[in-house]
Each structure stands twice: as structure tokens, then as C-alpha cells.
Amino acid sequence: MKQTFTLAFALLLTFMVHAQIPKLKEVQNVQQSEVIIGLTGDLELDKNLEEMVKKFWTICPISEILPLKEARKKAKENDKLYVIHFGSLHSMSPKRYIGDNYYFKDISTGYFIGLTTGAKKPLMRSYIPIFDNEFTEEVLSHGVTYMQELFTLMLDNEVGALKTLKIIKDNSTQLKDKVLYIPEWWMDSKLTEEDITKRYKGKYEIVSHYEWSSAILNKTPGIAYSIIIPVPMGGKYVYQHHICDAETSQIYGITQPKGAAIQLNGLNMSKANKGYVSKKNLDQYNDVLNGK
């Protein structure tokens, strides 16, 4: 029973990564349409978002830049217009009763780059992390390029979203030709260099934020990077690790916790579900390297 549940939950998480991707027919329509960049009203965030979309979005032309509410309204009136925007989503756990009349819920908030036809619920959410309450350029760029890469895989291979998982896995061994940049601030403090080299057999460097960010923004050849994505679920987070090519944005791997349990008071994830790189995560990185 436990094994069946674990498998079902793993499929749920995998589906959650890809579920909010449009069907192939919709993605083909996106390719033949235009996008509006929807602005939040936060000047610094909007500036970074505009720059990253202009720099990295190539799947279809950008028509204009408007406040998000106005952009949505315009897209609703034209089926050849979409809106790419920044957004957030709250996830809540079931009620925890303190007494007969009092209860509370765990709440987790996820941030994403979204694509919408104008509806409030986007066709896709590409989740991103947050650093010190700031959404930096390289984080926003990953939200854009991750979405676009999945769309491109669908278009080039004429497949639906879930079938892109197999394509990513088939191509993952190309990671062997890259140096994997692992950000130092996401490393488990207990990890030693011996732990890393024992578990991850590819080329790697533990890098500063500047080195990591520069590789992503400058599309540095020969470099892959890992990024930890907190996806809100059940009032907690499922921490996904994306491994991508800095130059081409090719996705080499999407790793996530393999075990979980549902409790009455919310979601209880496995020990591998942590917001940093642990021994178990390095094992998963090595599986990506070997196409497992």
C-alpha cells in the first residue's frame, strides 16, 4: 500500500510540474501569436521582468507592455494575444483545530512567471525562488526560459507536456560535457568536498551568486546550473531542483523528493525535501548525469 501511494504521489508531483502547461494545440497557437508583458506596478520588479522577457523570450513576438489588468483585458478580446507576467499563488493546509471554535492553517506562497489568455488563472506557472524579498534578473530569466524550453520541446517533437519528460531524460547525459555550477548558499553546511565528489561524478564548481548569475545572464558556453524551485503545496513546499544549460536553456533534469506522506494536518514531505543541496540531492544530480 505504501509503495502504491509513493508511486501515485510521485506521479502527482511530476504532473504538477507539467500540468499547468497548455496542450500542444494551444502552444502552437502561442507560437503564431504575440505576447503582452503585463506589469505589476512594482518599478524594480517590472524593470527586471521587462528586460528578461525581451532578452530571453523568442517563441513569438512581443507586441507591447501594459499594466497587468489592462493587458489581461486586451488579451481576452483577441485569441492571438497572450500575457506573460509575474504572479503568486497561496497554498493552504487543511484546518488544524485548537478548540471547538478555533483553527489555523499553514500557508505557503509560491512566485512564478505566468502565461495567460487574459484569465486570472494562467495556462502555465513557471515557479521561481526569491532572494531577500527580491526577484533578481537571473531568477526571472529562469522562469521565462524554463517555460519557453518546455514549449519548444513540445513544438519540435509535436508531443504533449508529459512526453517532454522522456525527451529531457533521453538528453540528460549531455550534462557530462558541462561544468555544473552549484550555488554555495544552497549547499548543506554539513557537506564536504569528499561527499560531493563521491556522489556527483560529473564536472562541477561550487560558485558564488555573482558567478552563478553571470553564467545565466551571459549564456556562458560549457556551463550548466542548478536552481532550487519552491513549489507551494499543502501549506508547505515541494523543493524541485532544475538543472539547465546556461547557454541554451536546455533542461537536463527536474529532480524532486521521492517519498512523502499525507497527514490530517497537511503535507509531510520526505527528508530529501529541503531547500538546499543535500547528499540525496547530489545522488539525484548524478542520476541525471547517467540518464536514470
Image: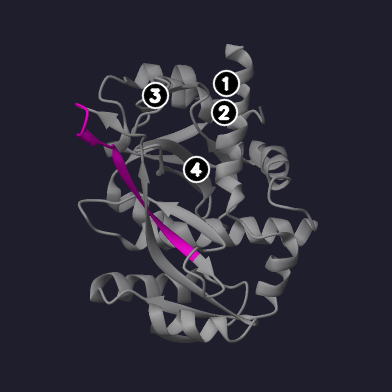
Which of the two discs, 1 and 4, labels the residue nearer the N terminus? 1
Image quadrant holding the N terminus, namely top right
**Closer to us: mark 2 or mark 4?**
2
Q: Position of residue 192 (x, y in %)?
A: 31, 19
Residue 266: give x, y in percent of width and height: 37, 29
Q: Residues within 10 Å of mark 3 (few under 14, many from 20)?
A: few
As drawn, the label of residue 6 is 1
Ranked by sequence position, the earlier of labels 3 and 2 is 2
Residue 102 numbered mark, or none: none
Q: Secondary structure at mark 2?
A: helix
Contact between marks 1 and 2 (CB within 8 A): the answer is yes
Along the line of sight, the residue nearer the viewer: 272 or 216: 272
Residue 185 in sight in this render = yes
User: Of discs 3 and 2, which sits in the foreground?
Assistant: 3
Labels 2 & 4 near each other (Cβ < 8 A): no
Query: Magenta segment range?
Result: 99-114
User: Of helix, strand and loop, which one carries label 1?
Assistant: helix
